Image (cartoon, rainbow, N blue to C red):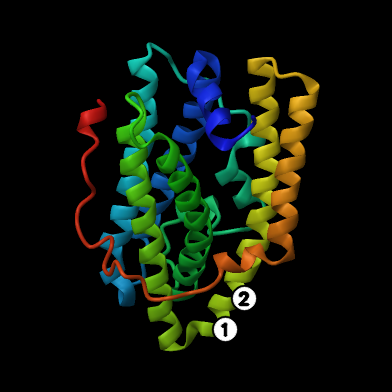
Amino acid sequence: MLSARSLFQEILDDDESFRLFCSIAASGESQGGWENARIAALVPDGERGLAPKITRHGADEDKHGRIFQALLRKRGLTPVPVPPDTDYTMILERHGIGLAHDRLRDRQPLTVEDIVTYLAHSRVTEQRASEQMNLLRRHFADHPDVGRAVRMISGDEDNHLAYCHEELLRFAAAGHGPAIRRTLRACALAEIRVYRDVSLAVMAHMGRVLGWPRGRSVLLAAGIHAVYAYERAGGWRRMVSLRMPERRDALGGPAAAASEFA
């Protein structure tokens, strides 16, 4: 029977598919770490109190990248180049979602509107990350090889999502509500298309690595299209709602170390 658990187990059991999976994940996390570090450095003077939290967000993403690299090393594997059609972060940027890398390379401070854009983009993408890691945690939290990594990354993604909710609500109370709603909607509708396309690309690459029969690849592609149809019909709305999280000040301290994976 084809399920999320059996699919990931198959990817986990094969060195080449695991190598591709970890390489894609490590690359995306490292890009997120760089982006957050640049945003923290460019926070406008009136919002400098946010800088330590953005720095913590970036440190968590960097840590996740190191964790995926460590998982490869433990199996005696090295990273592979990430296929461009699986690069979720860069494809989102090309669709104009979030802050452009050219802007982040500039030395000019960001505006409050830029920070709102960053937080709205993060609220959408962290929803996706939190859901994906919760799925893996349900099935693989006790796995001897990846269990600790899954638990740590899942907890971090939940913290990131809580932080985005709390900070966006603060900005909404300060009068940025209409801009937040517009940006969240645009980000969510773009993200679900990008996620569909990247998912199709990842499964195509995995199918070639693992030698899947055409029927299985067609079935997986149909499932991905079905998820997109649900999200386009209204499922995207879960990505734009805001509520005060139970976990307040979720990024108020230093990032947990990843030394156990080294």
The residue nearer to you, when weighing 247 against 115, is: 247
> In this rendering, would 23 be left or right of 182?
left
- The residue identified by callout 1 is 178
Q: Where does residue 94 sit, x and y in percent of width and height?
A: 65, 50
Residue 41 visible to an observer of this rendering: no
Element at label 2:
helix
Q: Are marks 2 and 1 in contact (CB under 8 Å)?
A: yes
Which one is nearer the viewer's eye here, 183 or 244?
A: 244
**Amino acid type at mark 1:** Pro
Rate crowding at label 2 as few (under 14), some (14 to 19) or many (20 or more) other CA atoms within 10 Å: few
Query: Quadrant of the rendered structure where residue 43 is?
Result: bottom left
| Above or below: residue 213 compared with residue 131 | above
- In the rendering, which numbered label is found on residue 182? 2
| Quadrant showing the C terminus | top left
Q: Is residue 159 left or right of residue 94?
A: left
Residue under the point 32% across and 77% down: 46
Foreground pick, 108 / 130: 130
Marks 2 and 1, how far apart at CA = 6 Å
Q: x, y (%) of residue 132?
A: 50, 46
Which element is circle 1 on? helix
Q: Residues within 10 Å of mark 1 (few under 14, many from 20)?
A: few
Percent from the top left, x then y, of residue 181?
Answer: 58, 77
Q: Tell me if residue 146 can be seen.
A: yes
**In the image, what residue type sits under mark 2?**
Arg
Q: Residue at x 62, y 28 (%)?
A: 83
